[in-house]
Amino acid sequence: MAISKLNAEQFANMAVNAAGVIFEYAGKDGKNTAMHFFGADYEATVKTQDEMFRVLRNVVTTFWEVKTKESLLRESNDGIRSKLRAGTPHRLIIRTSAGVTVKVFDLDASVWARIGLMPTKKDLERSARDRKKYIHNATKALMEALNFRVELPKDAAQPEEVQTEQSAEQATAESAAPVTVAETVAEQPARRRGRKPRNGAETVAIAA
């Protein structure tokens, strides 16, 4: 995994399908900069809630770990600073490892002024046990803010579109149906009008 800080020129030349999590920061005259989180820990393999939660939790955890380390090092060298920014990004872009866009979240157009990435001084004073729980809850809240729990399926086996009430009722009726015709035919070979088909096999015409 890696984290890259991109200046305006680098961000402008960045691949349009770059995988990972990208925080875009507004700059003067439209010259925006960015922070790019990429690698297995920051790249979802599929567009599901579970994968998004894993990726976002890793991002939030990284902010916490780096900020904690920075605070400790600055006690001996106050000039040390991490590349992670405390400011709120202008836009959040998330793509899978295959370069498929999962979400482009424009914070300027949303109701949220901040999304709670950088831990506060109070957060850093939490015990290791409390911190793990808080990171988990903070990630859940971020998932809600980005609307991932509505827009994405829980796992890969679940379709992305929400099933309609009619299709759900149809699926229930089908699951309650008796043994299928194919199974009945397989168990009870029959002849059609007394004629034997070639090669000794028996076939049956099934009326719809």
Image (tube, rainbow, N blue to C red):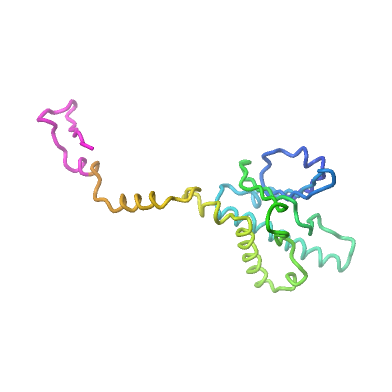
Q: Nearer the viewer, residue 66 or 142?
A: 142
Q: Is residue 183 above or below residue 172?
A: above
Q: Outermost residue toward the top?
A: 198
Q: Outermost residue toward the left?
A: 194
Is 92 covered by the magenta stretch?
no
**Residue at position x 82%, y 40% from top?**
9
Q: Position of residue 47 (x, y in %)?
A: 56, 48
Q: Position of residue 19 (x, y in %)?
A: 66, 44
Question: Which of the image's four quarters has the C terminus?
Answer: top left
**Residue at position x 24%, y 50% from top?**
178
Q: Main secondary structure of the magenta part?
A: loop
Picture quadrant of residue 200 = top left
Is 191 covered by the magenta stretch?
yes
Q: Nearer the viewer, residue 62 or 22?
A: 22
Figure label count:
0
Residue 33 left/right relative to 155? right
Residue 97 left/right relative to 4? left
Q: Position of residue 38 (x, y in %)?
A: 69, 48
The magenta span reads 184-208
Q: Position of residue 154 (x, y in %)?
A: 51, 55
